[in-house]
Image: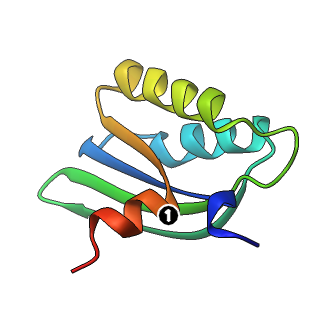
Amino acid sequence: MGEQNKVVISVLGLDRKGIIARVSNILYNNDANILDISQTIVSGYFTMVLMADISSPECSFDVLASELAALGEELGVQIRTQLSEIFESMYRI
């Protein structure tokens, strides 16, 4: 699987019930597959970094990113969706 078929999704905001479920539901509805996920809560702040496979022909990066951004606004959290190759280039030393 090429890097262009993976996305890195980060979520940051005040903790509330259902964040993981709602993000996972959008991924499921867009035929994306979660490859790795890490989440934690620190002093009431929820953080999550997730890597997903978007290689399905049914999955559009633009649609997925738009739906996740809208969810972030609805939940009052920041959700960023980046292609993994761009994410890795940005953080390469």
The amino acid pointed to by label 1 is Glu
User: SS for tag 1?
Assistant: helix
Residue that sits furthest to the left in the current view: 43
Residue 82: give x, y in percent of width and height.
46, 49
Residue 89 versus residue 58 in the image, above or below: below
Q: Quadrant of residue 57?
A: top right
Q: Which residue is mark 1?
A: 85
Image point (75%, 43%), residue name: 28
Task: Specify the quadrant that holds the C terminus.
Answer: bottom left
Badge count: 1
32 vs 38, nearest the viewer: 32
Q: Quadrant of residue 36?
A: bottom right
Q: Residue at x 70, y 70 (%)?
A: 2
Left/right of residue 63 with respect to residue 46 in the rendered view: right
Where 76 falls versus 34 (above or below)? above
Q: Position of residue 37 (x, y in %)?
A: 52, 68
Which quadrant would the N terminus be assigned to in this image?
Answer: bottom right
Name of the residue lying farthest toward the right: 57
What is the x, y in percent for residue 70?
46, 20
> In the displayed structure, would residue 59 be above or below residue 46?
above
